[in-house]
Image (cartoon, grey):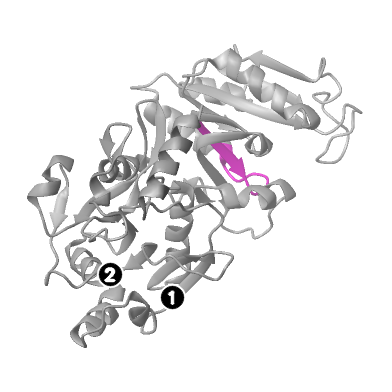
C-alpha cells in the first residue's frame, strides 16, 4: 500500500453522484492559499474496446498505450472532468489511465510525477486498493441506495460518506483543511483525553512517558488536535498539563476513577458527540474514530464502543453522547465506579474493531512500542 498523506481521494457509490463537483468545490476553496494538483483515474479492465459501462466504447480503453498512461490536462474549457478540475484552480491536472491489473505500477508512476510532497485531490475508487490517502471521501446520491461493486468493497475505508442532493452536499466543506501538507477533517465533536490515571502497572506516570522526545499525552493530542472542534484533557493536576495549551478539566470529586473523568469532561464539552480515549493509546486510528462518530449519528446511540474478536470492548476508546451523562451520574451517585454499569442504563452500539489498538500498560509494552516505532521506515 502506497501512503500519500497529501492526497484527498474522492470515490463514488454510483454514477452521477457529484464526485467531480465535490472535487472542484474543494479546489476552488483551497487553491487560493495552497498549490493543489488534480487527478482523474480511469481503471481499465481489458483493452478489448468494450465499454465496462455498456454499449459501444469511446476508445479510451482500447487506445491505452501499454499498461498505464499519465496525461497532463492543458485545456480548461472542454468540460471533461480533468478540464473542470483545471478551471476550478487545480494545477497541474493529470489523467491516469491504467489497467486494473497494473494499479500498483500506475500509482507509483503517478507519485513520481507529482513528487512525494505534492498536495492533490484525486477522483477514483479503484486507486484506494493500492493507495492510502490522507483523506478518503465516498460520494453517494440521497435518492439512491444502490452501490456499485467497487464502492461496496471500499466503503469501510471511507473517512466520510458524503451525500449529494441537487448540487449540495451534507458535509460542510469548511471542515476540510490542510495542515503542513496533510488533509484534515475537523469533526463537529469534542476529543477527550483521560490523563488522570494512577498508572499502577506501569509504575510511573504513563501520560508523560517520552515517545521520540515528546510526552505520550502530547503525542496523542497532536494526532487529534486538527480533527476535532474542541479538545479537553481530563486530569486533576491542571498545572501539570498546562504545557499542552488545552483546557484541562479536573474531576468533580477526585479519586473516583475514569467514570468520574468521563462525567466531568462531558459536562464541560461544547458538543453532543465526544470521543473519549485513555492516554495510554499511542496511535489513534482516525478512520476508525470517524466510523464510530458516523455510527453514533446514524443510530442515535448514547455510546458507540468497539469490540474485539475475543468479545472484549474498549470503553476508553469510544464515542459518548452528552445524553449518556444521566446514566453515568446515576451510577456515580449510587457509589458505582464501573463504566459497564453505566452501559446497562444507556443505548449502546457495539461495532467490530478492525484495527490494532495498542495500549501501553507496562514497561515491557512501552519498550516494545519504542522498538517497533524505531523499526518503521
Q: Nearer the viewer, residue 181 or 28?
A: 181
CA gap between label 2 and label 1 equals: 13 Å
Q: Residue at x 21, y 71 (%)?
A: 260
Badge count: 2
State whether residue 90 appears in this view: yes
Residue 67 point in image, percent of width and height: 80, 20
Kindly give the residue lying farthest to the right in the view shown: 48
* Residue named by callout 2: 322
Does the stretch in magenta take in 12? yes
Residue 328 point in image, percent of width and height: 27, 78
Q: Quadrant of the N terminus?
A: top right
Residue 300 point in image, percent of width and height: 42, 71
Q: Residue at x 50, y 31 (%)?
A: 376
Kindly give the residue lying farthest to the left in the view shown: 239
Q: For mark 1, does the 10 Å Cα neighbourhood hold few (<14), some (14 to 19), or many (20 or more) residues?
A: many
Q: Nearer the viewer, residue 263 or 282?
A: 282
Q: Residue at x 84, y 35 (%)?
A: 51
* Residues shaded magenta: 6-19
* Residue named by callout 1: 348
Does the stretch in magenta take in 318? no
Residue 277 point in image, percent of width and height: 34, 57
Q: For mark 2, does the 10 Å Cα neighbourhood hold few (<14), some (14 to 19), or many (20 or more) residues?
A: many
Q: Earlier in the sequence, mark 2 or mark 1?
A: 2
Foreground label between 2 and 1? 1
Q: Is residue 170 above or below residue 9?
A: below
Q: Nearer the viewer, residue 10 or 210?
A: 210
Q: Kindly identify which numbered label has been placed on residue 210.
A: none
Amino acid at each position: 500500500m502506497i501512503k500519500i498523506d497529501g492526497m484527498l481521494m474522492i470515490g463514488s457509490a454510483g454514477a452521477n453522484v457529484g464526485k467531480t463537483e465535490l472535487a472542484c468545490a474543494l479546489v476552488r476553496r483551497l487553491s487560493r492559499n495552497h498549490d493543489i494538483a488534480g487527478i482523474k483515474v480511469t481503471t481499465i479492465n481489458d483493452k478489448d474496446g468494450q465499454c465496462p459501462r455498456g454499449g459501444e466504447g469511446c476508445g479510451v480503453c482500447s487506445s491505452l498505450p501499454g499498461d498505464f498512461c499519465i496525461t497532463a490536462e492543458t485545456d480548461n474549457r472542454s468540460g471533461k472532468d480533468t478540464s473542470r478540475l483545471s478551471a476550478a484552480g487545480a494545477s497541474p491536472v493529470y489523467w491516469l489511465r491504467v489497467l486494473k491489473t497494473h494499479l500498483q505500477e500506475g500509482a507509483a508512476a503517478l507519485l513520481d510525477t507529482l513528487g512525494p510532497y505534492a498536495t492533490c485531490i484525486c477522483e477514483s475508487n479503484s486507486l484506494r486498493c493500492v493507495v492510502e490517502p490522507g483523506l478518503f471521501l465516498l460520494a453517494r446520491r440521497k435518492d439512491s441506495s444502490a452501490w456499485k461493486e467497487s464502492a461496496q468493497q471500499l466503503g469501510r475505508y471511507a473517512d466520510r460518506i458524503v451525500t449529494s442532493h441537487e448540487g449540495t452536499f451534507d458535509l460542510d466543506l469548511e471542515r476540510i483543511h490542510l495542515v503542513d501538507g496533510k488533509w484534515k477533517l475537523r469533526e463537529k465533536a469534542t476529543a477527550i483525553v483521560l490523563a488522570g490515571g494512577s498508572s499502577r502497572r506501569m509504575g510511573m506516570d504513563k501520560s508523560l512517558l517520552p515517545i521520540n522526545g515528546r510526552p505520550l499525552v502530547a503525542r496523542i493530542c497532536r494526532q487529534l488536535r486538527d480533527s476535532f472542534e474542541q479538545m479537553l484533557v481530563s486530569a486533576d493536576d491542571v498545572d501539570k498539563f498546562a504545557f499542552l495549551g488545552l483546557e484541562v478539566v479536573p474531576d468533580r470529586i477526585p479519586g473516583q476513577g475514569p467514570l468520574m473523568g468521563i462525567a466531568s469532561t462531558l459536562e464541560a464539552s461544547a458538543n453532543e458527540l465526544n470521543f473519549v480515549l485513555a492516554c495510554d493509546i499511542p496511535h489513534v486510528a482516525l478512520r476508525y474514530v470517524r466510523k464510530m462518530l458516523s455510527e453514533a449519528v446514524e443510530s442515535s446511540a448514547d455510546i458507540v464502543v468497539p469490540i474485539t474478536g475475543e468479545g472484549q470492548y474498549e470503553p476508553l476508546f469510544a464515542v459518548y453522547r452528552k445524553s449518556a451523562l444521566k446514566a453515568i451520574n446515576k451510577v456515580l451517585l449510587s457509589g458505582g465506579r464501573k463504566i459497564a454499569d453505566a452501559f446497562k442504563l444507556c443505548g449502546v452500539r457495539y461495532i467490530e474493531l478492525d484495527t490494532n489498538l495498542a495500549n501501553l500498560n507496562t514497561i515491557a509494552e512501552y519498550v516494545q512500542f519504542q522498538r517497533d516505532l524505531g523499526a518503521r521506515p
